[in-house]
Image: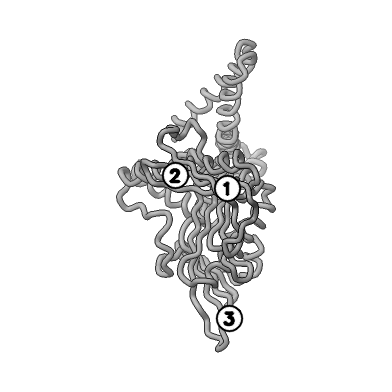
Amino acid sequence: MFDRLDQLEARYEELGRQMSDPTLVNDQENYRKVSKAHRDMEPTVEKFREYRKIKAGIAEAKGMLADPEMREMAQAELDSLEPRLGPVEEELKIMLLPKDPNDEKNVVLELRAGTGGDEAALFVAEVFRMYMRFAEQHKWKVEVLSQTESGIGHGLKDVTAIIEGHNVYSQLKYESGVHRVQRVPETETQGRVHTSAITVAVLPEAEEVDVKIEAKDLRIDTFCSSGPGGQSVNTTYSAVRITHLPTNTVVSCQDEKSQIKNREKGMRVLRARLYEMEAERIHQLQAKDRKQQIGSGDRSEKIRTYNFPQNRMTDHRIGLTNHQLGMVMEGMLQPTIDALIAHATAEKLKAETAAG
């Protein structure tokens, strides 16, 4: 581990020297790449320097213990420094774990009603609102691309949005899967608790350089935007349906009044889906046991349950239960997300230790 850290520090210093080179400063594209690499390395290098400083301080204090006049001060220094060494070393191990290249990306968020009819559609709208509240807390920008209303209440059969901001994918990537809700629907006259399910997909947004799409592989249809019950919202053919013929992937976008803007947004979603399909194919080759991101929407394939009568949310992957469901639905997701990230990091550390 320390050999890797020495190499990282040497590379960090080399990049720092490059950044002061006038020829690089004049080449803006390369300068951005070098400065980003330098910036990305900085936290790990700073933490390594902190570790070395603590280590040197411990060695110096131990050397002073033999001197009766310095012993008390040396012991106080050791008492201060030694408890810090282990935690800093653990932080360094985590910092050296392989980074997910998608963590910094924006995301395409897709929610769909599964089992449960109108009740599932109502829950889609509520969970989408929960993510909007969470996005607001992080000052992320949310852009709805398409949504299909259920025709009852404020329900949504499905909704697709792009969320843009700092490290969005790193925060939301563990939200993918089936979310189950247990409660008494408004239409239930006998007070029975019903179970419904929705699916959530979080896809890293792909750049054009990540996914090459040939024009000949696309079929683009235009149609009039429609509202609940199929009623026409406008009479211009501004809504766009894009079909990627080789994979039969279909994307619709009707949020904008401009056909050009709808097409641009639709292509962003298509690139994200194709990128995810390719990433999934590579993952399947590398690890046969990786589960599909989304199941069929059946209630048995759940990652999380929201139980309204008992005021609790349970994440089944890590056995986490929160008894403040109302706050969760208002977007207070950070404790759950932090716990999921911590669990994933611990699993990676275990795997690295076993491999090492």
Is label 3 in contact with label 1 (beta carbons under 8 Å)? no
- Sort mark 2 into few (<14), some (14-19) or many (20+) by Cα contacts within 10 Å: some
Tell me, yes or no, if residue 171 can be seen here.
Answer: no
Per the image, label 2 sits on a secondary structure element best described as strand
- Residues under labels 2 and 3: Cα distance? 38 Å
Depth check: give the residue in front, 306 or 250.
250
Q: Looking at the picture, which amino acid does disc 2 mark?
A: Thr
- Residue drawn at the location 56% of the way across and 31% of the way down: 41
- Residues under labels 1 and 2: Cα distance? 14 Å
Q: Position of residue 272 (x, y in %)?
A: 49, 43
Q: Looking at the picture, which amino acid does disc 1 mark?
A: Ala
Q: State whether residue 222 is above or below residue 1.
A: below
Depth check: give the residue in front, 77 or 344.
344
- Residues under labels 3 and 1: Cα distance? 34 Å
Q: Position of residue 229 (x, y in %)?
A: 58, 65
Residue where numbered disc 3 is placed: 187
Q: Position of residue 250 (x, y in %)?
A: 45, 48
Tell which residue pokes out farthest to the top in this image. 23
Q: Looking at the picture, which amino acid does disc 3 mark?
A: Thr
Residue where numbered disc 2 is placed: 243
Depth check: give the residue in front, 352 or 232.
232
Residue where numbered disc 1 is placed: 239
Per the image, label 3 sits on a secondary structure element best described as loop
